[in-house]
Image: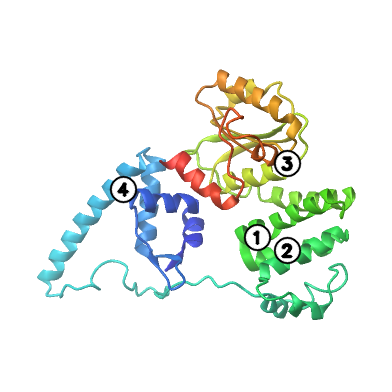
Amino acid sequence: MYSIKQVAAMLEIPAVTLRAWENRYKAVQPQRNESGYRVYSRENVEDLRWLKQQVEEKGTSISSAVCQLKQRQSEIGGRAGAAGRAAGVPEGPLSGRGHGTGTGIADGPVTEPRTEIETAVAAEPGILTGPGTGMAPEMLTGVGPGTTALQTMSGRIYQSLISFHGERAKELMDFGFSLYGYDAMVYQVLVPVLVRVGDEWEAGRATVAQEHFATQMIMLRFSHFFHLFPVYRSLPKALAFCPEGEHHQAGLLLFSLFLRKQGMEVLYLGANTPEAGLDKLIGEQGIDLVCMSLTTPRLTGAAAELVGRLKASYPRLRFAVGGKALEKAEAGSFPVEVMPPMPQEWERWFEKEFFE
């Protein structure tokens, strides 16, 4: 049995696509383990591999491919049942597919436990304490009731960054990614650090230098992942930028990483992008989706006019815009819908936008 992360890695199909194929087209029906996680059999994986080939190599729509798969399964099942009856094999609930393979692959449920901070320290003593973390070893047990390992990791990284201990912060991030993986470290550890350092700077409790150092360290880590995810040509092509005058690009990079992780090609222009040349670039590169982030309220009017001009030039162009400035803007005042701010809402948006 395989977890959804394992299947996504084996087949190079984004997890969000696997869920969409399951929920909307009933492509496969994975089981659920005791913790509620999806677990896929070897037959499920082969069915998904076959669907991917039909979609990517033959240009078949996913709905048509699923219909063909169901027909093939029905025919194979009918032939197998007839052969079994002829051989005197009794039919029963365990005579179908996916009930033990005899290959040595575990048939039991796959669990995805969360490693607590004590386990992390036992695995590599001293990694969360010592010079540069601002925390003494005895403080590990004093994080308070309800504090999770991920929250503790986030706190240690924050303390290292505002103390300008870059190597210690790098060690913590390396260790965290090895323990928790990409999603947990990005969304539950590093994003909270970015938010916290920004809030502390706005409140006057962190200096500009501290805010810049922490932000750049995390942004550099995010950018390392940008070209690691595979690109699926069947998905639209995106352009991501902050408009001229907007220098805060953390949110834009985070959203662009989300799109890259789903398999979308993203042309990332970054902060303070002038309008000159955008119109031509969109046409020449066949851009389908424009992503824009805005945190500076005074730039909202100019950004709205820019979106209006791009919409006039390319009526079929889609937009994903967000940022603090647009979240605080009056409802309906911007020419396109503003994206939800929470990363967990992006997957629902992605499914609705590209799979419905």
Residue 265 vs residue 324: left or right?
Answer: left
- Which amino acid, mark 1? Gln
Q: Is residue 83 above or below residue 318?
A: below
Residue named by callout 1: 188
User: Secondary structure under badge 2?
Assistant: helix
Which amino acid, mark 4?
A: Val
Query: 60 or 162, which lies in front?
Result: 162
The tag earlier along the polypeptide, 3 or 2, is 2
Query: Is disc 2 in contact with disc 1, using a CB cutoff of under 8 Å?
Result: yes
Q: Nearer the viewer, mark 4 or mark 2?
A: 2
Check disc 2 and report the residue beneath it: 154
Q: Residue at 46% across / 45% down in the picture?
A: 351
User: Which residue is the site of mark 3?
Assistant: 249
Answer with the quarter of the image where residue 246 lies.
top right
* Marker disc for residue 67: none
- Element carrying mark 3: loop
